Amino acid sequence: MQYYSLGKQSPNVDFKTAAITGQAPDKGLYFPTTIPQFTAAQIERFKTLDKASLAFEVMKPYVGGAIDDASLQQICAETINFDFPLVPITETIASLELFHGPTLAFKDVGARFMSRCLGYFSKQTRAENASTENVHSTAAKPSTVLVATSGDTGGAVANGFLGVDGVQVIILYPKGKVSPIQELQLTTCGQNITALEVDGSFDDCQAIVKDAFMDTDLNAAYNLTSANSINVARWLPQQLYYFFAWQQWIQKYGDDTPMHIVVPSGNFGNICAGMMAKASGLPLGHFVAACNANNVVTRYLHSGNYEIHKAVATVSNAMDVGNPSNFVRIMEIMQNNFEQLKNSLSSYSYDDTTTESTIHRVYKTNNYILDPHGAVAFLAAEEFNKPAIILETAHPVKFPEVVERAIGETIAIPASVQFLLDKEKVAIPMGASFGVFKSWMLNKAIA
Ligand SMILES: *Cc1c(COP(=O)(O)O)cnc(C)c1O
């Protein structure tokens, strides 16, 4: 399997290079040269396959031999070793709970898969260097993962990469714009994880990371890798949720009822992965992108004009993205055809007041606690008005201020994150400019 750059100005690469470099030299996102096609017989078998085997079979064509089968099997099994239950909320809306991983958000799957792939490649490189005894010459620089987060990515990446040999992780997060538990998840790891508290927005953090990948000096000093959903190793395994959801859906409703899917979307990596799964033969229904006030795609689908805006802060902060990186990949799947896009994807957008009252309403009516992202998705599912699943992308406890205000009760902190409360935040304050970041990185290299 080869990957080409959507910028069309860089050579094709294999999975290993795409995962290690993150972005192509021309700033384009990598995309597989062919979308693997699962046969009807494979799809039939997928209906009852165990999660780990299914994950292996789905990921194998994308990895394309860059990782040996036994290792890939192990990576897949470790990636998905928690539950992905489909829980009914109303008669027509079910919640695919993607928050049962270690950091209580769906990003655990992508982060766990990617970290293990990079760990594998790093070990491979060290073994090659050892065998050629070139330790004194150009011994490979360790990988440095740079990641911008609006909250959930940072925690998932920190957790996924913690202790992975040969990989350093630097996380940039917007000061005061992530929830207390999120902040603890990304600032208390230590070891190979460093958190930078940036005095700016998520878009500022993302812009710094994008500039860093283009910077000659930084690339000379470091082997930089991105862990945002632009990285294929983080983006592609997100397809797995859709396979797991579909297995549960057909058990319940049979395979004649289409499974429509509502995805709370920010950078559009998650929904794009679902659309890939469908393009590879998984029989999924219509896709609905649920957005907050950052609704460039919602407006595009209505007007045909793609107008990016600066991100505005909302209560569903993981979707506060003004210029969604992965939308170009969706357009590629849709062969850059606007009509085809409109037939496959709808989008609705909601303000914070409506989101909060929905958390309240669904709790009172259905006894289900939505997180703010899930609430935006729930609203979109109601507006779409056909039986659908919503992706519940984070546990409500990650947004306690909003959720507790909406339901009028405190939410219990799950035992799995209780230990964080005793830990001390360690973060380096940083101005929201690439120049400041660059000199910090270069001084750090010298130090
Ligand atoms: C990251 C995130 C999203 C948005 O996912 P994208 O792939 O960026 O569209 C939605 N909800 C939560 C809780 C998230 O962490």
Image (cartoon, rainbow, N blue to C red):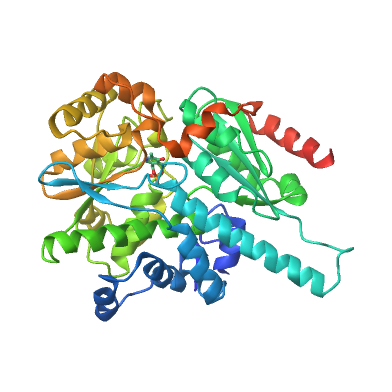
Name the one closer to the observer, 104 or 282: 104
Q: Is residue 230 visible?
A: no
Residue located farthest toward the bottom when viewing the structure as drawn: 41
Where is residue 292 shown, x and y percent of the image? 31, 32
Where is residue 83 shown, x and y percent of the image? 35, 53
Residue found at x 33% / y 38%: 296
Name the one closer to the observer, 258 or 402: 402
Residue found at x 38% / y 36%: 319
Quadrant of the image occupied by residue 279: bottom left
Please, is residue 316 above or below residue 416 in the view? above
Name the one closer to the observer, 309 or 238: 238
Where is residue 432 shown, x and y percent of the image? 60, 27
Residue located farthest toward the right when viewing the structure as drawn: 136
Tell me if 336 is positioned left or right of 167 in this view: left
- Tell me the quadrant of the picture where the C terminus can be found: top right
Please, is residue 374 above or below residue 167 in the view? above
Q: Is residue 265 visible?
A: yes
